[in-house]
Amino acid sequence: MTAEERISISDQLKREIQNAEGALAYKREKALQFAQRLREVIETIEINCNLQASAEDFEMEANLERRISPEYQGALNYTAAITVLSELKIARQALVNVRLRRSQIAPHL
């Protein structure tokens, strides 16, 4: 293997690692946002559990404040949760695989 080929392979692996790290960072952010939506749903449920029975339960404004916003509907989707976890795992595995390839090739570069 020529020095030029070694440099080319090394550069390619560096780019692959950077891409894999970027993909993992993106998936982590996506998962953190999903978790935040879940926390907000949980908080709304907990608030409602602690409310006392009152005439406010019949008021439109109170109903709007105490309901779960439609934007959080996806947070209650089991399939979406499994997908987020799966995407995280796949991104972590991809990064591990590229790092392993680099470590196996590094002695030969």
Image (tube, rainbow, N blue to C red):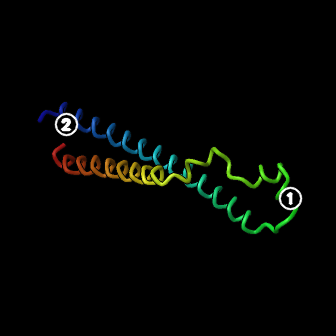
Look at the numbered disc 1 and give the secondary structure of its residue: helix
Q: Quadrant of the N terminus?
A: top left
Q: Are marks 1 and 2 in contact (CB under 8 Å)?
A: no
**Location of residue 20 by image quarter:** top left
Which residue type does callout 2 highlight? Arg
- 52 vs 80, left or right, is right
Q: Residue at x 35, y 49 (%)?
A: 90
Q: Nearer the viewer, mark 1 or mark 2?
A: 1
* Residue 59 in picture, x, y percent from top left: 85, 53
Other residues around mark 1 within 10 Å, as few (<14) / some (14–19) / many (≥20) = few
Q: Residue at x 51, y 46 (%)?
A: 30
Q: Residue at x 51, y 52 (%)?
A: 77
In the rendered view, would you say 44 is above or below 74? below
Whichever of labels 1 and 2 marks the residue nearer the N terminus, that label is 2
Q: Residue lying furthest left in this view?
A: 1
Q: Identify residue for label 1.
A: 56
* Residue 82 in picture, x, y percent from top left: 43, 54
**Location of residue 49 by image quarter:** bottom right
- 61 vs 29, left or right, is right
Q: CA distance from mark 1 to mark 2?
A: 72 Å
Q: Residue lying furthest right in this view?
A: 55
Which numbered tag is attached to residue 6?
A: 2
Which residue type does callout 1 highlight? Glu
